[in-house]
Amino acid sequence: MDHRLAQLRALMAEQTITALLVGSATNRRYLSGFTGSYGWLLLTADAAIIFTDSRYTIQAAHEAPNFTFCEVNYAERPLPKLLKAMAEELGLQTIACEAAHLTLAEHQQLEKALGSAISLDPKQNLVESLREVKDETELTTLRRAITLTDAALAAVLERITPQTTEREAAWMLEVAMRLGGAEAISFPIIVAAGPNSALPHAQPGDTPLGEGQPIVIDMGARVDGYHADLTRTIALGTPDARFWEIYDIVLAAQRNAIAGLRPGLATHEADALARDVITAAGYGDQFGHGLGHGVGLNIHEAPGLRRAAANAPAVHLRPGMVTSIEPGIYIEGWGGIRIEDLALITADGAEVLSQAPKLR
């Protein structure tokens, strides 16, 4: 964790931030290793303090040994009171806080406790900007989660039948990932058959998987906090010509995107690598979501690979980023095709991390 704190402190110095209060559970884990459900970090150029309650005294000492522990007692030593005392001890006049992770009520409580002598300064994406590029420890863990996910899909595909329902298949996938070593699933598993597969975020129901129709399976295992994300579209039995037409367009779009990924490429340009293929085939209106998203401690994190927003600054790919590549075509009343892999941006291109077989 030391190199992460060093990177953050360098960023704070660059932006003349003397202290940062971290409330995001994900950012707290990234910087300290602490995985408890409640806690705050206060970071300065020299101090690293973790505020949490008595439930986590032992855990915080074990997971975040380089942090000074400060126990929160909700009746006598609530966080606002402790933060004020610590700020006065450190001589702080301004504390930066995470605008996206501090509720209005929390902000008001802290402001009231700190008084006029110490101000809160909301900031955006300080820690998130560091998390975009994965270090070797993170990549090792991500590879474990991805390998586990690939293996679970392979095991379940051998067992499902046309009579298996979406819900049953989803449960089989979850069990396979848990038995394979996952601490949890990354998100609610999607198994969507036939017309249901036209819903990008369909929920598994009692529909049988059937024969000859598209079945979208979107799944991922979480290992040591890091997520995998994999989508395959399959068919049991013999699919018709329309299935193969749509499947081949989506696969060509994904392959074109992966081949074109490289450092320096803008995220909206990456999206266009797949979108242009689908649009040229006449299905541009049936590809509504972005090409992909970053994956790490959160299942959806920066960078987002999608069409450029008006007046938004361009975001460029950098070596070490891990992103999903998941084009899709969704046709109401018929179904959908989506193919998704995770890819690591390398020094000169991209490495596909997912290895689950595709139909072509």
Image (cartoon, rainbow, N blue to C red):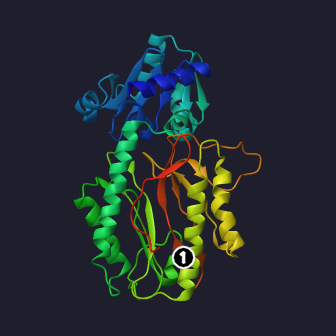
Question: As rendered, which of 264 and 74 lies closer to the eye?
Answer: 264
Residue 190, x across and y down, in percent: 43, 69
Q: Is residue 156 above or below residue 21?
A: below
Q: Residue at coordinates 41% horizontally, 31% vertically from top-left?
A: 31
Q: Is residue 280 above or below residue 3?
A: below
Q: Amino acid at mark 1?
A: Tyr
Q: Residue at coordinates 46% horizontally, 35% vertically from top-left?
A: 23
Q: Residue at coordinates 22% horizontally, 30% vertically from top-left?
A: 58
Is disc 1 placed on a helix, strand or loop? helix
Viewer can see residue 103 = no
Residue 177 placement: quadrant: bottom left
Residue 217, x across and y down, in percent: 42, 71
Residue lying farthest right? Answer: 311
Q: Is residue 167 above or below residue 186?
A: below
Residue 108 placement: quadrant: top right
Residue 157, x across and y down, in percent: 32, 74
Q: Residues within 10 Å of mark 1 (few under 14, many from 20)?
A: many
Viewer can see residue 313 = yes
Residue 289 placement: quadrant: bottom right
Q: How many marks?
A: 1
Q: Is residue 6 above or below residue 27?
A: above
Question: As rendered, which of 345 and 142 lies closer to the eye?
Answer: 345
Q: Quickly name the residue at label 1.
A: 247
Residue 258, x across and y down, in percent: 56, 56
Question: As rendered, which of 306 and 282 lies closer to the eye?
Answer: 282
Q: Is residue 317 left or right of residue 151?
A: right
Q: Is residue 129 left or right of residue 188?
A: right
Q: Residue at coordinates 55% horizontally, 69% vertically from top-left?
A: 251
